Amino acid sequence: MSERLTTAAFAALAAFWLWLALAAAPPGPFTVDDFFYIVSARRIWQGAWPVFDNGFADLGAEELKLWFLVEGPRGLTPQYPLGFALLAAPFDALLGLRGFFVVNALGALAMVWGCWRLALGTLGDRRWAFAAAATLALASHLVEYATGLWPHGASAGAAAVSAALFFEAEAREGRARARGAALAGLIGAVGLSMRLDVGLLAPTLLLWAVLCARAPLALLAWGGVGAAPVLALSSWANFQRFGTLNPVSYGVGREGGVDPAAHMGPALAVLSALGAAALWRALRARGAAPGKAMAAALGVLAAAGLGAALAAPHALWAALARAAQGAHAILIDIGAYSRADEEARIMRDAAGYLTFVGHYKKALLQGAPWIGLCAAALPSLAAPGAERRGVALCLLALATWAAPFVWLEWHGGLASNMRYLTPALAFAAVAAAVGARRLARIAGRPEPRALRLTAAAVLGATAASMAFGLASGAAAAPYAMLSLSRQAGLAAAAFGAAALAPLGASARRVAARAALGAAAVGVVAGAVTAHLYDLRMSFARREAAVQLAALHSDLPDDALLLTFHPQSFADRFLRHGQLYNLRRTTRDALDLDRRPIDRAFDEGRRVFADELFWTYVLSLQPGLRARPTGPETQPGFGMVEVFRDAPAKDGARAAEGR
């Protein structure tokens, strides 16, 4: 594949995603998280710290802290890192909310570029590198975050580019190696300043450098040098906001998924792997054969596991069972999720599929079935040179990124997919391309023809899905696609493993062709799911948020607004404050601080609430009633005005409202 054709394909992808960002996508937020990025970026653009009051300093009501605002030395401030808000602020000033979309589109393009560079370095073949990048771009849920407001697209792009540059730096010498590693560290730290889960790149690169790099200490040291300035700035910003020099603090103690104790299982696994890798490296440096060094390292791990089994057998088996359950639900089939009955916002429909606030959830394999081909890349760990190093990096990244979410069995909340695993998709695409090439050689199929046919099918599926989705304006429940995707992914993995087994040549050829066929079905299924379902569900929710804000743009300036959808009222919050929300939706609705509500009534101010807040919270409060102020833009997106009953007179009460 020529360089000109590759450049043209990247240009076409950029045009498509920028068209979505600047024209097709509704210019509205998706979730409550978006609210905090919006108000942070706009306050930064005004030349001030993103610090707010909202009446909390006066009354101290927890509900005035909203979600994700925490107390700091300067006042209430969002818990999220400031990197994305800082980066998006000028784009937002120029384009409004579409500016956030543009930043994420550019970040997602960087992720595709990083995937392509990593695949090219691993495979040494432009056609297969292009296949990996195209699969990532068109047959995964990346497109949703390429046109979203929260920073998954931008942070995932930073992670992929950082990994690709670090991989390329290892193959260089002297100053070129130092510059490449430092740039990789710098970009990785920028990603960390946008989303803390980019920090999972650090143990990935650490393990990989110990296992595969010729000069791991120098490579890691220069990476640290590059990261240091951004980490220092993050520390300073967190000191100003939270009073701590910790560059990865959420300012909330042990909440927000940053409690080290919650990740003890994955942390111990990483430390054990690092110890084994260091032992293997030391033995190799002393002249031990690769096989003997690996046997010694694995023997130490096995001895540690045996010791744990003897010392605490029940704890070990419980940990293994927990990891297996999490892997099944998060990576293979979300229907296996074990805590659905414990979460108010999780429901099973009549067919047994899981929804979160109306969004059908998908495990990683159900959203990107072609990942099943990664199993066929395992033999490349014994291959010489760049292919071994590249596959090792990709598989380590997949394992490291999945580990905390598998351990916690955390599905990512409001999203149709595993949004926290978005950065892992680039590494999965490279490993899948390695596996596909190996299987194509076993199958005896001409590689260019197979690639062209699959590319045509994916482009056709993407175009048809977009056309149907834009024409219909709605997304159907993806029952058939969820089942088909899981089956295609598992079939690709199973047949791929069979093709690598010590069978006869004809049996291996049949298995390889079956694996490639299942993967091709999975690629098309991934493209259809991403563009017909995920993107349309995102657009529908964002359009509802836009309509909600427009319908109620004329609320009195001094009104108190009780809402589960603050993202629709970011501008109002910046001008007037006066937003009120529960700190957690699972909190007992009767146990809330009514002082802000009662003060608003006492001062003669009007009180409004969105439909969800009234139904699940305020309607359970004594002495309050409400009436609608307009139509619902989507179930749960309506608005009511709240009234407080007057004191009873002659046994009569006001009858207004409901």
Image (cartoon, rainbow, N blue to C red):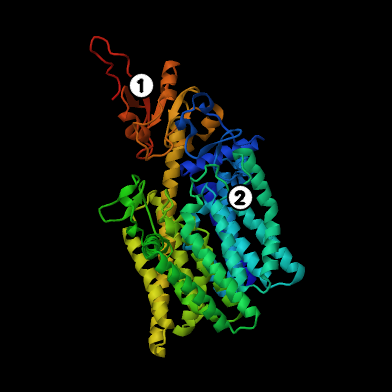
In the rendered view, tell whether residue 51 sits above or below residue 217.
Answer: above
Q: Residue furthest top?
A: 650
Q: Residue 601's x, y, as percent?
A: 41, 18
Element under label 2?
loop
Q: Using the image as rendered, state which of residue 117 and residue 540 is in the foreground.
A: 117
In the rendered view, tell whether residue 346 sits above or below residue 549.
Answer: below
Q: Residue furthest left?
A: 651
Q: Using the image as rendered, state which of residue 112 and residue 326 is in the foreground.
A: 326
Q: Residue 363's x, y, as percent?
A: 40, 60
Residue for point 27% across, 18% down: 655
Q: Amino acid at mark 2?
A: Ser
Residue receiving disc 2: 193
Q: Residue 524's x, y, as percent?
A: 42, 66
Residue 633, picture quadrant: top left
Element under label 1?
strand
Q: Residues within 10 Å of mark 1 (few under 14, many from 20)?
A: some
Q: Residue 621's x, y, as percent?
A: 32, 27
Residue 160 visible from this viewpoint: yes
Residue receiving disc 1: 643
Quadrant occupied by the C terminus: top left
Q: Earlier in the sequence, mark 2 or mark 1?
A: 2
